Image (spheres, helix red, strand yellow):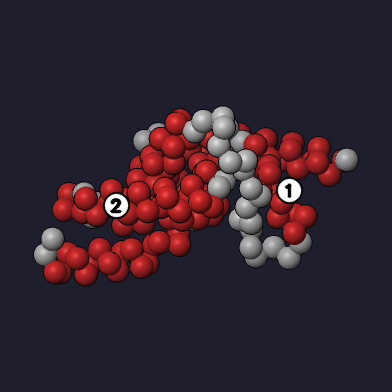
């Protein structure tokens, strides 16, 4: 790899490593698996960096790779792995009970809804960017977000009734 490309990739890595780890953490719900998935994401990105055309942002490109890596890992996940740990994904919240409840609610979503929630609310991507990452239409992104909100509302409302 040429020195200029190497420097570009190093900047991309430094700019997005925490962001990609968070995506993996929200998808996989396990810090160790997420660290491995984030490393695999950057390895795949490095191997394919010469083909990156910059038609999308580096963040969108890396997020697409990370989502695919996480999906592959979820497919391969065996039933005898380490139990899932509670993950603090809402670090800005002051109330730990609220953070855990919201984390549990998000983790209860089916993967196709969870990934849209993660990309929209935590990665702050647009419907169009999410559409490109997941390979679904913009209206489908909106539909999945609405479905996820309804399920989250139901989950959180039921949880508060206890």
Residue 125 visible, this orientation: no
Q: Is residue 122 above or below residue 109?
A: below
Q: Describe residue 120's horizontal placement relative to residue 135 as left or right.
A: right
Q: Is residue 6 above or below residue 137?
A: below
Quick one: SS at disc 2?
Answer: helix
* Label 1: how many Cα within 10 Å (few below 14, some 14–19, many 20+): some
Q: Which mark is residue 101?
A: 1
Name of the residue lying farthest toward the left: 2
Quadrant that contains the C terminus: top right
* Residue at screen point 37% across, 67% down: 15
Q: Describe residue 84's horizontal placement relative to residue 95 as left or right.
A: left
Quadrant of res 3: bottom left
Q: Which residue is mark 2?
A: 43
Quadrant of res 155: top right
* Label 2: how many Cα within 10 Å (few below 14, some 14–19, many 20+): few
* Residue at screen point 36% across, 68% down: 14
Q: Give the distance between the C-alpha atoms of the residues marked 2 and 1, in whole angstroms.
A: 34 Å
Residue 37 visible, this orientation: yes
Quick one: SS at disc 1?
Answer: helix
* x then y, percent, for residue 151: 67, 35
Name of the residue lying farthest toward the right: 162
Q: Describe residue 85's horizontal placement relative to residue 12 as left or right.
A: right
Quadrant that contains the N terminus: bottom left
Work out whether residue 47 or residue 62 is closer to the camera in this orientation and state it. 47
Q: Is residue 18 above or below residue 113?
A: below
Q: Which mark is residue 110?
A: none
* x then y, percent, for residue 80: 57, 32
* x then y, percent, for residue 47: 21, 50
* Residue at screen point 58% across, 41% down: 82
* Residue at screen point 62% across, 43% down: 84
């Amino acid at each position: 790899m040429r020195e200029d490309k190497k420097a570009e990739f190093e900047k991309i890595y430094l700019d997005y490593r925490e962001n990609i780890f968070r995506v993996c953490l929200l998808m996989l719900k396990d810090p160790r698996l997420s660290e491995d998935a984030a490393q695999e994401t950057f390895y795949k990105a490095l191997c394919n960096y010469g083909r990156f055309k910059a038609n999308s942002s580096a963040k969108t490109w890396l997020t697409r790779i990370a989502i695919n890596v996480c999906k592959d890992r979820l497919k391969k996940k065996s039933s005898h792995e380490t139990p899932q740990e509670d993950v603090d994904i809402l670090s800005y919240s002051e109330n730990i009970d609220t953070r855990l409840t919201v984390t549990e609610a998000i983790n209860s979503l089916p993967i196709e809804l969870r990934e849209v929630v993660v990309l929209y609310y935590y990665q702050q991507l647009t419907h169009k960017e999410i559409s490109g990452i997941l390979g679904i239409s913009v209206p489908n992104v909106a539909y999945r977000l609405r479905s996820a909100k309804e399920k989250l509302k139901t989950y959180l409302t039921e949880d508060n009734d206890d």
